[in-house]
Amino acid sequence: MTHDMFWMVAMLIGLALLFDFLNGFHDAANSIATVVSTGVLNPAQAVVFAAFFNFVAVFVFHNLQVAATVGKGIVLAEVVDTHIIFGALVGAIAWNVITWYYGIPSSSSHALIGGLVGAVLCKSGWQALVWDGIGKTVLFILISPALGFVLGSAMMVAVAWMFRRAQPDKADRLFRRLQLLSAGAYSLGHGGNDAQKTIGIIWLLLIVTGYTSAGSHIPPTWVVLVCHAAMALGTGFGGWRIVRTMGQRITKLRPVGGFCAETGGALTLFVATALGAPVSTTHTITGAIVGVGAVQRPGTIRWGIAGNIVWAWVLTIPASGLIAAGAYYFGLFFF
């Protein structure tokens, strides 16, 4: 391995960890928006709380199927080179920054996948795509918010029935405590699913540059640990523009609603991670919040805000793909 290649790989790993940091920063809102909105934790407490569970996920989710899907199941590994990895990461990072700036809760996961697809299409065309993995990802774009909606609304109905005779003040105090459990579970699921996307891209980089065997079934341990740490650090810095959209602008939540939304979202993430599906935590928690709001007071949901979020979901993969295509050609010219 040449000296220049070593530094190229090191630079791309650094870029991947920057994406991972921004993933945590951008998606911090998904973990903490409801717990901040309901007043259970203040913003500083919430980000530390979420970052802790983001990192602890490394010891809980030993099944790295999501990393395998991203690393080996989206595009053919044999066509990937350092220029494609560069393009994919720049596309994903750029779209994350754009959507963060405008306070739009888009998907970091789908930005990375869109970037990977966009860069690969520039080099090798449609035949280099792995349609099974892409199909699974696209399917869960629909499934994750729908399942979040169903589970969030079902939790809300069940809780309303179980506590129908409880005094409102006592119920509120109880669910303020329970929301710590649900927020922790959601942050755990967030770390377990989202950190694996960066693990997958670094794993793919190490394979195509010869630092790891193509036949390896698990990524190096240091990659797993560093990716979870980078994501937790990003969550610790938070993304307050998006927190406001997720926690307050879609619908106003009380502790009971926050508990139901987080629990429904966490269950969705656990299922998706077990199935190896790289889902969007943004899609998941949005679906759960809307589900809870629809049960409580349908008229309070700001469907225009929700509609704007859906448009961001639709645009994420093609937009990040286009940026990645430009970055791919830039990399060819300069590197």
Image: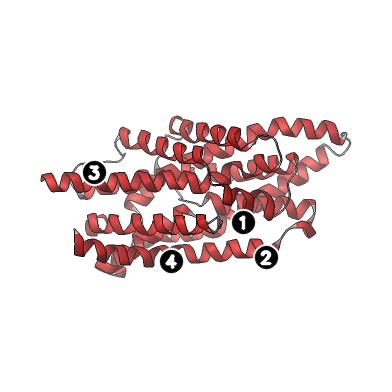
> Disc 4 to disc 3, how far (Cα)?
27 Å
Residue 81 occupies which quadrant of the picture?
Answer: bottom left
Q: Can residue 231 be seen from the camera position used here?
A: yes
Cα separation between marks 2 and 4: 22 Å
| Residue at the spot 73% in from the left edge and 46% down from the top edge | 253
Task: Check disc 3 and report its element: helix, strand or loop.
Answer: helix
Q: Tell me: 130 left or right of 164.
A: left
Residue corresponding to mark 1: 146
Name which residue type carries label 1.
Ala
| Residue at 50 percent of width and 58 percent of height | 99
Q: Which-is-in-front pick, marks 4 and 1?
A: 4
**Residue drawn at (52%, 66%), measured in percent from left and top?**
314
Q: Amino acid at mark 2?
A: Gly
- Look at mark 4 in the image and give the residue it sits on: 319
Q: Earlier in the sequence, mark 4 or mark 3?
A: 3
Instruction: Give the spatial CA distance, label 2 vs label 1.
Output: 18 Å
Which of disc 4 and disc 2 is earlier in sequence? 2
Which residue is tagged 3?
Answer: 10
* Mark 1 nearby-residue class (10 Å; few <14, some 14–19, many ≥20): some
Amino acid carrying mark 3 in the image: Ala
Residue beneath disc 2: 304
